[in-house]
Image (tube, rainbow, N blue to C red):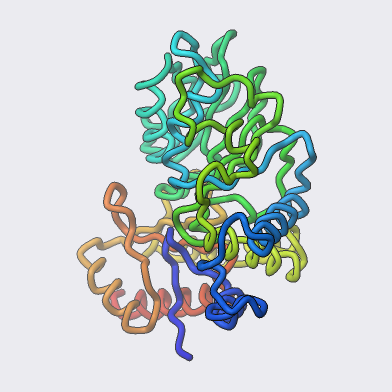
Amino acid sequence: MSRVHNFCAGPAALPVDVLERAQGEMLDWHGAGASIMELSHRSPEFVGVAERAEAGLRRLLNISDDYAVLFQQGGASQQFASVPLNLSDKGDTVDQVVTGQWSKKALAEGRRLVNVNVASSSESSNFTTVQDRADWSTSDDAAYLHYCPNETIGGLEFDYVPQSASPLVADMSSTILSRPVDVDRFGVIYAGAQKNIGPAGLCIVIVRRDLLDRARSDIPAMLHWKVAADNDSMYNTPPTFGIYLSGLVFEWIEARGGLTAMHQANQRKAQTLYGTIDASDFYSNPVDLRYRSLMNVPFTLADDTLDKQFLKQAEAEGLMNLKGHRSVGGMRASIYNAVEQSSVDALCDFMHRFENEHT
């Protein structure tokens, strides 16, 4: 079997062991005579799958019973509306931090539904750094503070968890499960699945239970976290295959040593790639050293007329999905949990050879 080196930002690489296990169970899940996708979501078989997936995530992140774990549809972008609808009323003020394209989208959606105070923005630096926490302008009466710990597109990542007097809400789509996290410091964590969790279409929401009663009276039932929590994420038919596959990914992470081991492996990959970039005058990364992303590594070539040739030759060697986001340009390598060190090594070897050919 020939597999490419997949550096896609999402949908991203999945562990081969997980895909092979799912392949083996595809036609007949554990003797059921049917695929997991063909079983009722209310059957004992699938309820067990969902319960095991939730338990696995709780173990990995050490999530206490003070938090509900929800399996939602619509990806993280749906939560841009769900957050204000669940945590604030129309006249309330909320604080938002803007550090890249995804927090900008959350801001735009939030402004449709609530009064938004931009507590901090990195736009003046073209999203290459994070404003000092002491310089943020937060509101005394904010319903919550929303931020994105890791910006997938720009490769900008917080190296700390902000202190907040109001509940802290984090879009962790591109950083969750890459390292240990102290969940107790957050009111809400949400994450699209298609990076470190599972297939696209699923979103994990981890919400402190005391926040479940803050929703507006006119919130749609499908966006209401309490409705989801009261119905074990089965108010309607949930994304059953996404939940199943995510549960297998959680097991895979545990088998590899959990989040501490994931973090160590991810640090090695990032050090290898950033080291190649920094040792060269041919490649560069624009992000403040302190706030470089562990998961998403953008880089540019000194001569951008070579971009198309770089991508063409990279793809010929099985190095796929390296084109940077259209809003940023250049290149981007996303090195999530399932991207092995060998893939990063192959990329760096190619980068060295390409540089030598053109200098």
Residue extending furthest bottom?
A: 1
Q: Report whether 114 appears left or right of 238.
A: left
Query: Which quarter shows the C terminus?
Result: bottom left
Q: Residue 108: horizontal and vertical position, in percent?
A: 35, 28
- Residue 271 visible: no
Which quadrant of the structure image shows residue 324?
bottom left
Name the residue located 74 percent from the left edge and 41 percent from the top edge.
182
Q: Residue 64: horizontal and vertical position, in percent?
A: 79, 40
Q: Report whether 315 appears left or right of 10.
A: left
Q: How many marks?
A: 0
Q: Residue 312: horizontal and vertical position, in percent?
A: 26, 76
Q: Report whether 181 appears left or right of 290.
A: right
Q: Nearer the viewer, residue 211 or 108?
A: 211
Q: Is residue 197 above or below residue 91?
A: below
Q: Residue 265: horizontal and vertical position, in percent?
A: 67, 66
Q: Nearer the viewer, residue 314 or 88?
A: 88
Q: Nearer the viewer, residue 164 or 27?
A: 27
Which quadrant of the structure image shows residue 306?
bottom left
Q: Report whether 110 appears left or right of 335.
A: left
Name the residue located 49 percent from the left edge and 68 percent from the top edge.
13
Name the residue located 59 percent from the left edge and 19 percent from the top edge.
214
Residue extending furthest left?
A: 305
Q: Nearer the viewer, residue 279 or 215?
A: 215
Name the residue located 77 percent from the left edge and 66 percent from the top edge.
257
- Residue 257 visible: yes
Q: Is residue 208 above or below residue 330?
A: above
